[in-house]
Image (cartoon, rainbow, N blue to C red):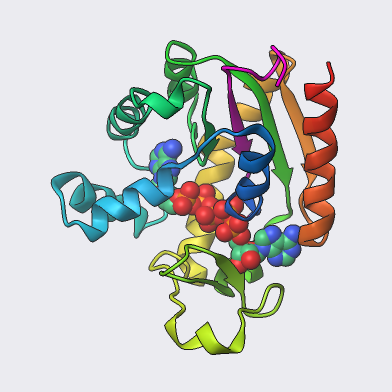
Amino acid sequence: MNSMINGKSIIIFGPPGAGKGTQSGLISTMTGKPQVSTGDMLRDAVADDSDVGREAKSYMDKGLLVPDEIILQLIKIRLSRDDAKSGLLFDGFPRTIPQAIALETLTDVSMVISLVVEDDEIVSRITGRRTDPETGEIYHLEYKPAPQHIRDRLLQRDDDTEDTVRNRLSTFHKQTAPLSDFYRDKGILFEVNGSGEIKQVSSSIEAIIEAKTGD
Ligand code: AP5
């Protein structure tokens, strides 16, 4: 791994349902950086019924962002672990300009891979999403059907209803989309058309990472 990527973090960026979680495994495997999803961390806190989880749920259920202080507290703890020394793959973080500015004081970011997908496609992706609680694998009723023998155990996320998805999209456009310009200005934003088939999107991401590691 070269100095462009070595020891630095990577961000996978995009609207809800853009495919960030789906593509994270590939990026993690290619770069050796552990995936850190703030959404998964918050859902774990909700499942534990902790104070943080209860507060976070009140925002998540409405499609709103959880306050920056809570998110940054989780990120600081995660970055203090040994395996963060080679950099992390952030999925769903940062989501506000203050989060991005705070991250600059915590780790170097080498690249931001931004998945671009239109809103109409997002709604059908999210309402059809199902997750395997045993493996964490993400499926879709139509675009990535799960094997027949595990279909009974698949779960739908509480915030994956059509109304909440529309709120999440509106939150994205207001508070998170401006981060594209923030990272474009730094020359580290790499946009990928996220609306092709899963394998096509993976190939585009692979090409970007290969080019970057060859720098
Ligand atoms: P989070 O869990 O991060 O949700 P999100 O950003 O809304 O993203 P998703 O997980 O919904 O989508 P994804 O891009 O990972 O898509 P996926 O790969 O699953 O956050 C949830 C909530 O937590 C937020 O609303 C907020 O309240 C809070 N939160 C989290 N982080 C925060 C932060 N930093 N600050 C403040 N609050 C925060 O794919 C979706 C579906 O599409 C799947 O079914 C998949 O199979 C399918 N699919 C994927 N790619 C394709 C393709 N190319 N073609 C067809 N189908 C596809």
Assign the magenta stretch its main secondary structure. loop
Residue 8 spot, x, y in % from top left: 58, 18
- Residue at image position (72%, 16%) is 2
Residue 45 spot, x, y in % from top left: 25, 51
Q: Is residue 128 magenta?
A: no
From which residue to which does the magenta span run?
1-17
- Residue at image position (78%, 41%) is 205
| Ligand 1 rendered quadrant | bottom right
- Residue at image position (69%, 38%) is 30
Residue 204 visible in image:
yes
Q: Nearer the viewer, residue 153 or 167?
A: 153
- Residue at image position (16%, 57%) is 49
Q: Nearer the viewer, residue 2 or 204?
A: 2
User: Which image quadrant for residue 69?
Assistant: top left
Residue 120 visible in image:
no
* Up-down relation of residue 214 to residue 159 (above or below): above
Residue 213 spot, x, y in % from top left: 78, 23
Q: Quadrant of the N terminus?
A: top right
Q: Nearer the viewer, residue 135 or 21?
A: 135
